Amino acid sequence: MKHRVVILGGGFGGLYAAKSLKRAPVDVTLVDRRNFHLFQPLLYQVATGSLSPGEIASPLRAVLSAQKNTRVLLGEVVDLDASRRVLLLDQGQELAYDTLIVAAGSRTFYFGHNEWENWAPGLKTIEEATEIRRKVLYAFEAAEREPDPQKREAWMTFAVVGAGPTGVELAGAMAEIARETLRHDFRSIRPEQARILLLDSSPRVLPAYPEDLSEAAERSLIRLGVRPRVNVRVTAIGEQGLHVESDAGAQEIGANTIVWAAGVRASPFGEKLVQRAGAKLDKNGAVMVQPDCSLEQHPEIFVIGDLAHFEQAGRSLPGVAQVAMQQGHYVAQAIERRLQGQPPSKAFHYFDKGSLAVIGRNSAVAQIRRLHLSGLLAWLIWLFVHLMYLVEFSNRLLVFIHWGFLYVTFNRGARLITGEATHARGAGLQSQNHDSVRL
Amino acid sequence: MKHRVVILGGGFGGLYAAKSLKRAPVDVTLVDRRNFHLFQPLLYQVATGSLSPGEIASPLRAVLSAQKNTRVLLGEVVDLDASRRVLLLDQGQELAYDTLIVAAGSRTFYFGHNEWENWAPGLKTIEEATEIRRKVLYAFEAAEREPDPQKREAWMTFAVVGAGPTGVELAGAMAEIARETLRHDFRSIRPEQARILLLDSSPRVLPAYPEDLSEAAERSLIRLGVRPRVNVRVTAIGEQGLHVESDAGAQEIGANTIVWAAGVRASPFGEKLVQRAGAKLDKNGAVMVQPDCSLEQHPEIFVIGDLAHFEQAGRSLPGVAQVAMQQGHYVAQAIERRLQGQPPSKAFHYFDKGSLAVIGRNSAVAQIRRLHLSGLLAWLIWLFVHLMYLVEFSNRLLVFIHWGFLYVTFNRGARLITGEATHARGAGLQSQNHDSVRL
């Protein structure tokens, strides 16, 4: 029997590990609870109605169907027996491995205030993205119907918490929706008067970027109509809006549409690795790994991507796709070397190709090694890089064409309000009157 | 103040009525509980993963944004006061009209067995389409994981109830998924061995079509791998599958994936028209209308589309988009004539341009007046007609390109399993173990 490699998670880390094992003499099983790989960097475009879910998600089976040594299993891993080298799936099935690659990723984190999720969805899944889309679009509809000026104001106020790349992208896209896409669509309200707040406790937007790029980003955001508010801490989120504190004192912000882009935390599978495989976690729930991404007590278990805490030059690597992809590739090679009886590979080293954050049309910031770019050039690089990385060819071309339309027409075709309102705030659409007639 | 026309429903009837009033000296308000017009004839392509919801839905505001005399209101109409000429919206708001056009459409009907909906979703909404997509795709995933041959068989059996155009289109697309799209994607099962049953109580598929076209459709379906079973009545649907009866006796069919395409019924808003405006319903819940589509006791109320029962040449018109569109156009003209003090227009007359049903790639049937076509030519006509009618230009071209890819590659990019499992059957994905770890 061939050496069995099981990969948990079909995100960037897991998928690239699987692909890099294409020619290895192993049997690969990739397990994920979703049947698709999600191109997370473009998820904000689904949340803001530019792209459809199908355009940024590729079925894992399709991506890996030509790879004969690999099978895909749709399922949830509920436990691990590291001594027997067996995973327990939901419905009681077992899955044995010789080498395990854990790439279970991260999820939205509310710093202990899980109740905030009711009012401020995060942006990690397709469902969250369509929920945000529903909330943003519904807010304009509700404002159009609302006769009371104060309530209307709350519908026309949008707060994005967290001014990292995701928050900046979301706020920029929301401003474009209000100022361009919906401009002529309403009769009672003027969408371009929407207030789009971008809140962060740091002293500047894009705090992980160099200062000059933060400044460029802030200028671009203001030009788009976003109001960045830095040095502001969110202390409560509820039905009426947010409570924030800053040096200027405390303040209530009435906002019916809030999006959470302030934090993620490693997948709880890390705790299973603590209990069953003697792993240690950092304060963010990420698993401390060896220089080859394996666990100290279980060298046959690798942890990569957002779930891994990897130190390089005294700093832990950021939770970005590039790190996960490079670790996936590295771990695949390390496994091949072990099987061939070669000496272990050198420690993993992350090669930082640079960082990109898009703000709006023709506007982005880019840090590529020592080169700092902003404006149109950075935006073109962003466009190019993202198209190149979209996994499937047909997706890539479709998205490209779709973006072309969008660029020329400002017309977001995917701005659909779908699904059940999962949060009380959105329930206005569902009538309380059970006698009601649905059109 | 201008004459106020309120239109209930943004389907084909309501939208075409609104568009036809573009130059009329009236204020138009279109009310719908969804913010988009849905191109229903292609909904089966969403259900089978070919197209994304955004590709067959156009935001009503976008479609009507350039029409200055028209506003769109997102809301639910809960009641009507015909004497005061006022509609009651959810949340207690009132909406006054001088002329009312009711185009509230129809919904899935289970012939009194509403509990069947739990096992056999219909295909009328975007949410139902993505639910069917989830069920169909999940069935193959579950089969891949299932060691027990009998249970696996139930996962590999797909039953479409109702062999009208929708049922035929769904069954044909499912066969293509199994035989082409997923062909190389699994390791334990062979998707092309899936059983796709198409059940109908009539003696032939497409019972509303001429006999020669029914025969052609049946041959095409069989060639695709569908098993049509006619003269079969479904008497029960439950967790294990279906109970059917025919001249050969009763039979249990083990099937975990069932789709209901057997019947629709007019919107319950018809009952409000009975209570409040003295309307009469036919046995299917549709409103009996005058030759000009108005109500006998309330000539200022028009009813069009699936909700209207209109007799022509001794038969009631079918519930198809063509009828609704022509009635919408007719009613708009009738309103203009009244306002100009001209004598009433002639009775509405439906001009039947023909019927089209698609079966699979290169295969459709078409009845255009006395011309009966099947095969490639009918399919090309189908393609042309559907592209021409897609409302928005950008959608049209995108869908065309997308179909081009699909035709060449068989690769259904939108085959995502998304959303919560709303039916118990699909709950396998959600672990019963609350301790479980989600990847």
Image (cartoon, coloured by chain):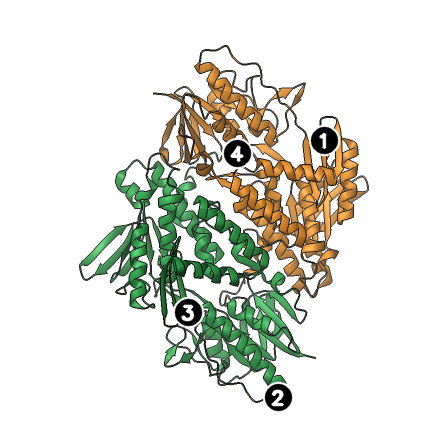
Chain colours: A orange, B green
Q: Which residue is mark 1?
A: A367
Q: Residue flagged by tag 1: what amino acid is it?
A: Gln
Residue A148, horizontal then vertical, whole percent: 71, 64
Dividing the image into 4 quarters, which one contains the N terminus of chain A? Answer: top left
Q: Are marks 4 and 3 on the same chain?
A: no
Which chain contains the residue that carries disc 4? A
Which chain contains the residue that carries disc 1? A
Q: Residue flagged by tag 4: what amino acid is it?
A: Gly
| 3D distance between C-alphas at marks 4 and 3 | 48 Å
Graded by Cα atoms within 10 Å as few (under 14), some (14 to 19) or many (20 or more), the crowding at tag 4 reads: many
Closer mark to the observer between disc 4 and disc 3: 3
Q: Are marks 4 and 2 on the same chain?
A: no
Closer mark to the observer between disc 2 and disc 3: 3
| 3D distance between C-alphas at marks 2 and 1 | 70 Å
x 41%, y 19%: residue: A83
| Vertical placement of residue A180 versus B202, above or below | above
Q: Secondary structure at mark 2?
A: loop
Q: Secondary structure at mark 1?
A: strand
Q: Which residue is mark 3?
A: B354
| Vertical placement of residue B82 versus B224, above or below | below
| 3D distance between C-alphas at marks 2 and 3 | 35 Å
x 41%, y 80%: residue: B312
As drawn, is B301 to the left or to the right of B245? right
Is the C-beta separation of discs 1 and 4 under 8 Å? no
Which chain contains the residue that carries disc 3? B
Q: Which residue is mark 4?
A: A11
Mark number displayed over residue B341: 2
